[in-house]
Amino acid sequence: MQTSFDPDSSYAAPPVLTVSALNQQVARLLERSFPLTWIAGEISNFTRASSGHWYFTLKDDAAQVRAVMFRGRAQFAGFVPREGDKVEVRALVTLYGARGDYQINVEAIRRAGVGALFEAFLRLKEQLGAQGLFDQQRKRALPMFVRSIGIVTSPQAAALRDILSALKRRAPHIRIVLYPSPVQGQGAADKIAAAIATASRRAEVDVLLVCRGGGSIEDLWSFNEEVVARAIVGCSMPVIAGVGHETDFTIADFSADLRAATPTAAAELAATARADWMASLAADCTDLRRAMRRTLSEANLNLDNCARRLVSPSARIGHQRLQLLALSTALTHALRAPLKQHGFALAQLRARWSGQRPDVRAWRAEIASQQRHFAASLASQMGARRHALAALAAQLELLNPQRTLERGYAIVSDASGQVLRSPAAIKVHTMLTLRLAAGSAEVGVASVQGLLE
């Protein structure tokens, strides 16, 4: 049976990848499967390209892998590895698509063994930071005028020569006190702390420099010890730490009141250049002269004005006497004129009032007559009303119930105060109130009898 191939059928051939697409997918697979990790090995075939990129092979006794570190990362490495160096790299596993070569892209590099030291550095930094040794509020400002500077370092260190040279050039007037101490090796941290404590106890300098030159993390480790950090924090004067190069950081840098990138930079921070002070003084002197000239000019101008206004005391007194006389005359006139004017107005008002005042003597006689008549009429009415009131009182006295009670009668009322007038309203075994002429009494009812017919 013959069949024909139908390209639209459900069967589809697998996709065909280009080599570039295959390498890209493999690279993505490797990058997803292997995150950034630390890898230890030995440097081999190291090449530093003109672009700044580093190319080398990382190997051990049994295997090797190609590595690349691009310029943006290499510039922060802190050192340039050499053939045979034991290193640890933090890298991303990937594939170089152009050649199909498996390689690693290095993000960071350090000498072998530095990892443990760095972890110890981070642990101590976190511990001391939690205790407040690195707080900015605790740190002190440098004095403006420094007269003496203390230096804690080794007498044989190149850093000391750099500091002395910088201070001699910038501020030769400053007194320098050296507190010698080894800066690396066994027991160096305790000796550095003891030198700092000696400087703090003597208190003979204004600023203390704790310095040494650059080196590996192992060389600088004495400045990563807790005893040195606590000695710096407890120092009685401000401390500037100038340890290593600009990229080197130690615990002493965080504990100090100020960090300098290098020992020379520490000397420059501690002492303002003499030339700068002289220039500042010269500028202040110029400003002071200018201010004094301006003040003198203003004073001279004021003096001239005062001299022009100055008058002889006798002449001034005579002038003031004339002024006083004129004011006295004006005051007298001002007082007399209103008085005269008001007196004349008052006389006019009195004359007008005399002409308009009525004769009230006849009215007063009429009022007196009316008052007498009213008094006589009122007395007559009062007598009549008193007589009528006495008659009514006598009638009222005849009708007064109290008089009836005094003749032996009584008023009977029940418990609610209702006056009883008929035996029918009285119930047996109830309490009644009898009101008598001289008081009242409570009585009980044993029996009730009606009127006999």
Image: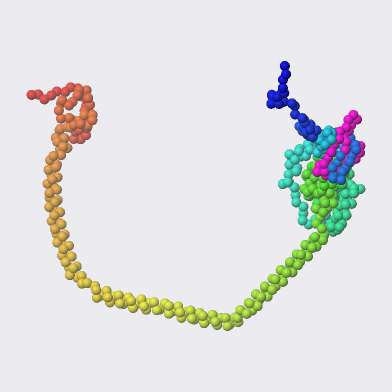
Viewer-closest of 308 and 99: 99
Q: Position of residue 255 (x, y in %)?
A: 78, 44
Q: Position of residue 306 (x, y in %)?
A: 63, 77
380 horizontally vs 441: left or right: left
Viewer-closest of 162 and 392: 162
Q: Residue 224's quadrant in the figure?
A: top right
Residue 279 on the magenta segment: no
Please tell me whether residue 145 is drawn above or below residue 154 in the rendered image. Answer: below
* Residue at screen point 85% across, 55% down: 167
Residue 83 on the magenta segment: yes
Viewer-closest of 19 and 342: 19
* Residue at screen point 88% across, 54% down: 165
Quick one: which residue is furthest to the top in this view? 1
Q: How many marks?
A: 0
Q: Residue 97's quadrant in the figure?
A: top right
Image quadrant for the N terminus? top right
Q: Position of residue 304 (x, y in %)?
A: 65, 78
Q: Position of residue 11 (x, y in %)?
A: 71, 24
Q: Residue 15's quadrant in the figure?
A: top right
Please tell me whether residue 141 is drawn above or below residue 190 in the rendered image. Answer: below
Please tell me whether residue 407 is drawn above or below residue 277 in the rendered image. Answer: above
Name the image colouring.
rainbow
Quick one: which residue is furthest to the left in this view? 453
Viewer-closest of 264 and 164: 264
Residue 197 can be seen, yes or no: no
* Residue at screen point 69% across, 26% down: 8
Residue 238 can be seen, yes or no: yes
Region rendered in magenta: 56-85
Image quadrant for the C terminus? top left
* Residue at screen point 75% across, 43% down: 134
